[in-house]
Structures are given as structure tokens and as C-alpha cells.
Image: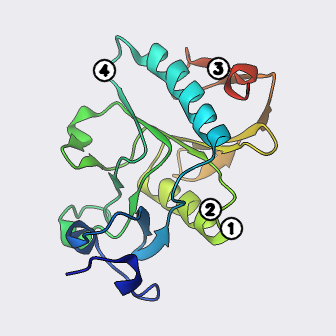
Amino acid sequence: MITSFDQLDPTKQYTYADYLKWQFQERLELIKGYIYKMSPAPSRRHQDIVWNLNVAIGNHIKGHPCKAYSAPFDVRLPVKDKKSNQEITTVLQPDICVICDLSKLDDKGCLGAPDLVIEVLSPGNSLREIDQKFNVYEESGVREYWVVYPEYSHVNIFLLDESGKFVGQHPKNNGELLRSTVFPELVINLSEVFSE
């Protein structure tokens, strides 16, 4: 039985079935089978930004057949056409995700790509981790992906095109309005998101 993060081999690939057996408190994510330890507790600024985005999104999706969730919430991204626990090697905990296909939801979280994923970067995020997440969100079919940079008070937006590739949009900065493409009526004033 694995009861400590230190018992895991960071060079080994794991599956969701392995992940379910681990009995420790540290938060981690699996990206293509490799483990990434998450920061123990995000900064207050990080939490403020997540909260402000949650409020805006939550108010918008009231009355829509969609659900929004905040980390910790497991998003399992299976190998295409295979959905057994043995075959899932990517389990992420995005800061916020919105799912409109409610059949993807179960008691363990979300199985499949959310419609919208938002990641608020922390100093502990490695470039490799950021790159890997971008790739798996793209490969799994996330329709819209926002990467929030608290340090610079801006958001990078990526939209999935017809060929299944993310296309970057012009970054949105503090004071500007962010308009979602997947949810066209969702307009967020970033001065409210980045307010302290």
C-alpha cells in the first residue's frame, strides 16, 4: 500500500487505477502517467482570482445545463476510445472546469474533456508541467482553455479549431473584458477578477 508520496517513483508511469489506491494527503496530478506534485496550498491571490472567476461563471451558468467545479476535482482524460481505469493515465485537477455534457460526470469527478478549463498559474508550476497540460487538454478535446497569469494580471485564451488544435487568441489584460467563445454570453470584467 502506498501511504506516502515519497514511495512513488517519479520516473515511472502510473494509471488512474494506481492513483485510486494511494493513501496519502498530498495532492498530485497524473499527466500521461507521470506524477506532478501540486503546491500544498495556493497563495491568497491565487485563491482570490479563482473565487472571482467562479462567481462570474457560476452566475452565468445558472439555468444552463452545465456544471462548474473547482480543484480539488479529478478530471480523468482517457486514451481515445478506452475508458477503463487501467487505461487512464492523465488525471488533472484544473482550478476551474465547466462541463455541459453531464453524462461525463460521476462520483469520482469528470471522465472526458470539459468544455472550458481554467488554470491559474502558481510559482510552483514548472514549464514542463504547463506544456504537458496544454498538450493533454488539446488532445482530449477541451474546447476552450484559459491560462491565468496572476503576476502579470492577464489571461491567455486558447480555442480548439476544427482540426483539433488550440489556436491562441490575443491575451486579455487587467481592465479588459474577456468574452468566452464556448459561452458567448459570458463576459468577464478582468478588473473584477484581478482586484485585491
Precedes in sequence: disc 3 or disc 1: 1
Precedes in sequence: disc 4 or disc 1: 4
- Which label is found at residue 130? 2
User: Which quadrant of the figure has residue 85?
Assistant: bottom left
Residue beneath label 1, please? 127
Precedes in sequence: disc 3 or disc 2: 2
Q: Is residue 64 above or below residue 66?
A: above
Residue beneath label 4, please? 65
Secondary structure at numbered mark 4? loop
Secondary structure at numbered mark 2? helix
Query: Please, what is the three-letter code of the amino acid marked with disc 1?
Result: Leu
Precedes in sequence: disc 4 or disc 3: 4
Query: Please, what is the three-letter code of the amino acid marked with disc 4?
Result: Pro
Q: What residue appears at the point 24 percent right and 75 percent down from the top-left corner?
A: 18
The span from disc 3 to disc 2 (Cα, nearest Å) is 24 Å
Precedes in sequence: disc 4 or disc 2: 4
The picture places residue 122, in percent across and down from the top left corner, at 65, 54
Badge 3, how many Cα within 10 Å: few under 14, some, many 20+? some
Residue beneath label 3, please? 188
Task: Give the left or right position of residue 177, taking residue 124 as reference.
Answer: right
Query: Please, what is the three-letter code of the amino acid marked with disc 2?
Result: Ile
The span from disc 3 to disc 1 (Cα, nearest Å) is 27 Å
Query: Please, what is the three-letter code of the amino acid marked with disc 3?
Result: Ile
The picture places residue 78, in percent across and down from the top left corner, at 31, 62
The span from disc 4 to disc 2 (Cα, nearest Å) is 30 Å
The span from disc 1 to disc 2 (Cα, nearest Å) is 5 Å
Task: Give the left or right position of residue 11, taking residue 189 as reference.
Answer: left
The span from disc 4 to disc 1 (Cα, nearest Å) is 35 Å
User: Which quadrant of the figure has residue 16?
Assistant: bottom left
Q: What residue appears at the point 40 percent right and 88 percent down from the top-left corner?
A: 9
